[in-house]
Protein backbone atom coordinates (compact mmCIF):
# COMPACT_ATOMS: atom_id res chain seq x y z
CA UNK A 1 0.00 0.00 0.00
CA UNK A 2 2.84 2.34 0.87
CA UNK A 3 4.45 1.82 -2.55
CA UNK A 4 1.23 2.79 -4.33
CA UNK A 5 0.93 5.94 -2.23
CA UNK A 6 4.55 6.90 -3.03
CA UNK A 7 3.95 6.32 -6.75
CA UNK A 8 0.92 8.61 -6.68
CA UNK A 9 2.83 11.28 -4.78
CA UNK A 10 5.78 11.02 -7.19
CA UNK A 11 3.52 11.32 -10.25
CA UNK A 12 4.02 15.12 -10.68
CA UNK A 13 7.81 14.66 -10.63
CA UNK A 14 7.65 11.78 -13.11
CA UNK A 15 5.49 13.77 -15.52
CA UNK A 16 7.62 16.88 -15.09
CA UNK A 17 10.81 15.00 -15.89
CA UNK A 18 9.27 13.65 -19.11
CA UNK A 19 7.91 16.99 -20.36
CA UNK A 20 9.89 18.15 -23.44
CA UNK A 21 11.88 21.32 -22.90
CA UNK A 22 11.22 21.40 -19.17
CA UNK A 23 14.30 23.21 -17.86
CA UNK A 24 12.42 25.35 -15.38
CA UNK A 25 13.03 23.08 -12.40
CA UNK A 26 16.79 23.11 -12.92
CA UNK A 27 16.69 26.87 -13.44
CA UNK A 28 14.92 27.33 -10.11
CA UNK A 29 17.22 24.88 -8.34
CA UNK A 30 20.32 26.66 -9.66
CA UNK A 31 18.94 30.19 -9.24
CA UNK A 32 20.76 30.94 -5.99
CA UNK A 33 24.09 29.85 -7.42
CA UNK A 34 23.47 31.89 -10.57
CA UNK A 35 22.44 35.20 -8.98
CA UNK A 36 25.27 37.01 -10.74
CA UNK A 37 24.39 35.44 -14.08
CA UNK A 38 20.69 36.35 -13.86
CA UNK A 39 21.48 39.86 -12.66
CA UNK A 40 23.79 40.35 -15.63
CA UNK A 41 21.08 39.05 -17.96
CA UNK A 42 18.62 41.57 -16.48
CA UNK A 43 20.95 44.47 -17.27
CA UNK A 44 21.56 43.21 -20.81
CA UNK A 45 17.80 42.98 -21.42
CA UNK A 46 17.38 46.44 -19.87
CA UNK A 47 19.98 47.84 -22.30
CA UNK A 48 18.05 46.45 -25.27
CA UNK A 49 14.73 47.76 -23.96
CA UNK A 50 16.36 51.14 -23.33
CA UNK A 51 17.52 51.43 -26.95
CA UNK A 52 14.13 50.47 -28.38
CA UNK A 53 12.12 52.62 -25.97
CA UNK A 54 14.37 55.69 -26.20
CA UNK A 55 14.53 55.66 -29.99
CA UNK A 56 10.77 55.22 -30.21
CA UNK A 57 10.24 58.13 -27.82
CA UNK A 58 12.70 60.35 -29.69
CA UNK A 59 11.25 59.78 -33.17
CA UNK A 60 7.59 59.69 -32.09
CA UNK A 61 7.11 63.43 -32.90
CA UNK A 62 7.44 62.46 -36.58
CA UNK A 63 3.99 60.85 -36.50
CA UNK A 64 2.44 62.19 -33.30
CA UNK A 65 -0.07 64.84 -34.30
CA UNK A 66 -0.04 66.30 -30.79
CA UNK A 67 3.66 67.17 -31.04
CA UNK A 68 4.75 69.77 -33.54
CA UNK A 69 8.28 70.06 -34.89
CA UNK A 70 7.58 73.65 -35.85
CA UNK A 71 8.77 75.32 -39.00
CA UNK A 72 12.01 76.64 -40.41
CA UNK A 73 14.88 76.88 -37.92
CA UNK A 74 12.74 75.40 -35.16
CA UNK A 75 12.07 72.25 -37.19
CA UNK A 76 15.74 71.93 -38.20
CA UNK A 77 16.80 72.32 -34.56
CA UNK A 78 14.31 69.67 -33.49
CA UNK A 79 15.54 67.19 -36.10
CA UNK A 80 19.20 67.83 -35.23
CA UNK A 81 18.38 67.30 -31.54
CA UNK A 82 16.61 64.06 -32.41
CA UNK A 83 19.60 62.74 -34.36
CA UNK A 84 22.09 63.70 -31.66
CA UNK A 85 20.18 61.97 -28.89
CA UNK A 86 19.50 58.88 -31.02
CA UNK A 87 23.30 58.67 -31.33
CA UNK A 88 23.63 59.17 -27.56
CA UNK A 89 21.28 56.27 -26.81
CA UNK A 90 23.84 53.70 -27.93
CA UNK A 91 26.78 54.66 -25.65
CA UNK A 92 24.31 54.95 -22.76
CA UNK A 93 22.94 51.48 -23.50
CA UNK A 94 26.50 50.18 -23.77
CA UNK A 95 27.19 51.44 -20.24
CA UNK A 96 24.16 49.49 -19.00
CA UNK A 97 25.24 46.43 -20.99
CA UNK A 98 28.82 46.62 -19.66
CA UNK A 99 27.43 46.81 -16.13
CA UNK A 100 25.52 43.60 -16.80
CA UNK A 101 28.59 41.89 -18.22
CA UNK A 102 30.63 42.91 -15.18
CA UNK A 103 28.01 41.67 -12.73
CA UNK A 104 27.40 38.48 -14.70
CA UNK A 105 31.07 37.52 -14.49
CA UNK A 106 31.32 38.18 -10.75
CA UNK A 107 32.60 35.29 -8.65
CA UNK A 108 31.94 36.94 -5.28
CA UNK A 109 29.90 35.35 -2.52
CA UNK A 110 26.22 36.26 -2.38
CA UNK A 111 26.85 38.68 0.49
CA UNK A 112 29.69 40.49 -1.27
CA UNK A 113 27.80 40.45 -4.57
CA UNK A 114 24.68 42.11 -3.12
CA UNK A 115 26.34 44.62 -0.80
CA UNK A 116 29.48 45.41 -2.76
CA UNK A 117 29.54 44.36 -6.43
CA UNK A 118 25.94 45.30 -7.18
CA UNK A 119 26.05 48.66 -5.41
CA UNK A 120 29.45 49.64 -6.81
CA UNK A 121 28.38 48.65 -10.34
CA UNK A 122 25.20 50.72 -10.06
CA UNK A 123 27.07 53.75 -8.73
CA UNK A 124 29.44 53.52 -11.72
CA UNK A 125 26.58 52.98 -14.16
CA UNK A 126 24.53 55.93 -12.90
CA UNK A 127 27.56 58.22 -12.83
CA UNK A 128 28.66 57.30 -16.35
CA UNK A 129 25.11 57.57 -17.76
CA UNK A 130 24.60 60.98 -16.16
CA UNK A 131 27.99 62.15 -17.45
CA UNK A 132 27.20 61.00 -21.01
CA UNK A 133 23.81 62.71 -20.93
CA UNK A 134 25.40 65.88 -19.54
CA UNK A 135 28.04 65.81 -22.28
CA UNK A 136 25.47 65.55 -25.07
CA UNK A 137 23.41 68.26 -23.38
CA UNK A 138 26.47 70.51 -23.36
CA UNK A 139 27.17 69.64 -27.00
CA UNK A 140 23.61 70.61 -27.94
CA UNK A 141 23.94 73.86 -26.02
CA UNK A 142 27.16 74.58 -27.90
CA UNK A 143 25.44 73.99 -31.24
CA UNK A 144 22.59 76.26 -30.17
CA UNK A 145 25.10 79.00 -29.34
CA UNK A 146 26.91 78.47 -32.64
CA UNK A 147 23.91 78.23 -34.97
CA UNK A 148 21.29 80.33 -33.13
CA UNK A 149 18.88 77.37 -33.36
CA UNK A 150 17.01 75.78 -30.47
CA UNK A 151 18.82 72.44 -30.22
CA UNK A 152 17.64 70.99 -26.95
CA UNK A 153 15.66 68.01 -25.74
CA UNK A 154 17.24 64.89 -24.35
CA UNK A 155 16.67 61.39 -23.06
CA UNK A 156 14.43 60.86 -20.07
CA UNK A 157 15.96 59.39 -16.92
CA UNK A 158 12.93 57.28 -15.92
CA UNK A 159 14.93 54.11 -16.53
CA UNK A 160 17.18 55.12 -13.61
CA UNK A 161 14.32 55.59 -11.14
CA UNK A 162 14.83 52.23 -9.43
CA UNK A 163 18.59 52.66 -8.92
CA UNK A 164 19.10 56.44 -8.74
CA UNK A 165 18.99 56.33 -4.92
CA UNK A 166 22.18 54.24 -5.01
CA UNK A 167 24.01 57.24 -6.48
CA UNK A 168 23.87 59.14 -3.19
CA UNK A 169 24.11 56.13 -0.88
CA UNK A 170 27.82 56.48 0.01
CA UNK A 171 27.46 60.16 0.84
CA UNK A 172 24.30 59.51 2.86
CA UNK A 173 26.15 56.88 4.87
CA UNK A 174 29.08 59.26 5.38
CA UNK A 175 26.73 62.00 6.58
CA UNK A 176 25.22 59.60 9.12
CA UNK A 177 28.70 58.55 10.28
CA UNK A 178 29.85 62.14 10.77
CA UNK A 179 26.63 62.84 12.68
CA UNK A 180 27.33 59.89 15.01
CA UNK A 181 30.83 61.30 15.61
CA UNK A 182 29.47 64.75 16.36
CA UNK A 183 30.85 66.22 13.11
CA UNK A 184 27.53 67.47 11.77
CA UNK A 185 29.17 70.43 10.02
CA UNK A 186 31.22 68.00 7.90
CA UNK A 187 28.05 66.11 6.95
CA UNK A 188 26.35 69.38 6.03
CA UNK A 189 29.21 70.31 3.72
CA UNK A 190 29.08 66.88 2.06
CA UNK A 191 25.31 66.79 1.62
CA UNK A 192 24.53 70.44 0.92
CA UNK A 193 27.65 71.69 -0.80
CA UNK A 194 29.35 68.81 -2.56
CA UNK A 195 26.49 66.54 -3.72
CA UNK A 196 24.22 69.49 -4.63
CA UNK A 197 26.96 71.50 -6.32
CA UNK A 198 25.89 72.38 -9.86
CA UNK A 199 28.05 74.66 -12.00
CA UNK A 200 25.71 74.76 -15.01
CA UNK A 201 23.90 77.99 -15.82
CA UNK A 202 21.13 79.13 -18.11
CA UNK A 203 22.05 79.26 -21.78
CA UNK A 204 22.95 82.69 -23.06
CA UNK A 205 22.31 84.31 -26.44
CA UNK A 206 23.96 82.94 -29.58
CA UNK A 207 27.37 84.40 -30.38
CA UNK A 208 27.45 86.19 -27.03
CA UNK A 209 30.15 86.04 -24.38
CA UNK A 210 27.62 85.03 -21.71
CA UNK A 211 26.39 82.22 -23.94
CA UNK A 212 29.93 80.92 -24.50
CA UNK A 213 30.59 80.99 -20.75
CA UNK A 214 27.36 79.03 -20.17
CA UNK A 215 28.50 76.39 -22.68
CA UNK A 216 31.89 76.15 -20.96
CA UNK A 217 30.24 75.67 -17.57
CA UNK A 218 28.00 73.00 -19.09
CA UNK A 219 31.06 71.00 -20.13
CA UNK A 220 32.62 71.65 -16.71
CA UNK A 221 29.49 70.07 -15.23
CA UNK A 222 30.42 66.81 -16.97
CA UNK A 223 33.79 66.78 -15.19
CA UNK A 224 32.04 67.58 -11.90
CA UNK A 225 29.69 64.61 -12.30
CA UNK A 226 32.67 62.30 -12.87
CA UNK A 227 34.41 63.79 -9.83
CA UNK A 228 31.31 63.08 -7.71
CA UNK A 229 31.27 59.54 -9.08
CA UNK A 230 34.87 58.78 -8.12
CA UNK A 231 34.52 60.39 -4.70
CA UNK A 232 31.34 58.35 -4.09
CA UNK A 233 33.13 55.15 -5.09
CA UNK A 234 36.06 55.94 -2.78
CA UNK A 235 33.73 56.69 0.11
CA UNK A 236 31.72 53.52 -0.45
CA UNK A 237 34.82 51.32 -0.54
CA UNK A 238 35.96 52.96 2.70
CA UNK A 239 32.54 52.50 4.36
CA UNK A 240 32.26 48.90 3.18
CA UNK A 241 35.74 48.11 4.47
CA UNK A 242 34.84 49.72 7.78
CA UNK A 243 31.65 47.68 8.01
CA UNK A 244 33.26 44.36 7.13
CA UNK A 245 36.03 44.99 9.68
CA UNK A 246 33.41 45.72 12.34
CA UNK A 247 31.42 42.58 11.48
CA UNK A 248 34.59 40.50 11.59
CA UNK A 249 35.37 41.95 15.03
CA UNK A 250 31.85 41.13 16.24
CA UNK A 251 32.37 37.50 15.18
CA UNK A 252 35.68 37.31 17.01
CA UNK A 253 35.99 40.26 19.42
CA UNK A 254 39.35 41.15 20.87
CA UNK A 255 40.99 44.11 22.54
CA UNK A 256 44.05 45.56 20.81
CA UNK A 257 46.25 45.26 23.85
CA UNK A 258 49.70 43.70 23.64
CA UNK A 259 50.36 41.15 26.35
CA UNK A 260 53.74 41.08 27.97
Image (spheres, rainbow, N blue to C red):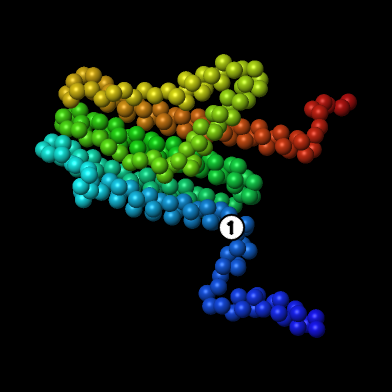
Q: Residue furthest top?
A: 185
Residue at (72, 81) in percent of width and height: 7
Q: Is residue 52 left or right of residue 62?
A: right
Residue pointed to by mark 1: 34
Residue 230 on image: x %, y %:
48, 32
Q: Nearer the viewer, residue 163 or 110?
A: 163
Q: Nearer the viewer, residue 105 or 148?
A: 148
Residue at (23, 22) in percent of width and height: 204
- Residue 201, relative to residue 131: is it above or below? above
Q: Secondary structure at mark 1?
A: loop
Residue at (28, 42) in percent of width and height: 85
Q: Is residue 252 left or right of residue 67?
A: right
Residue 13 on image: x %, y %:
65, 75
Residue 105 visible in the current orientation: no
- Residue 16, relative to residue 250: is it above or below? below
Residue 28 on image: x %, y %:
60, 63
Q: Nearer the viewer, residue 70 or 255?
A: 70
Q: Is residue 140 left or right of residue 194?
A: left
Residue 11 found in image quarter: bottom right
Q: Is residue 138 left or right of residue 71?
A: right
Residue 119 found in image quarter: top right
Q: Which quadrant: the N terminus?
A: bottom right
Amino acid sequence: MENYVNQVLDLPKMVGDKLPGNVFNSMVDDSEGNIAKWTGMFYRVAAFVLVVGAIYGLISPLWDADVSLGEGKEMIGGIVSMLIYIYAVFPIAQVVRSTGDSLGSSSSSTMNFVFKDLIVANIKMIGHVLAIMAFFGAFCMGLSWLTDMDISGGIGTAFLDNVIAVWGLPMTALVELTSMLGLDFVGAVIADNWMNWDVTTMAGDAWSWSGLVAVAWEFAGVALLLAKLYVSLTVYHFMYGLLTTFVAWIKSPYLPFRSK
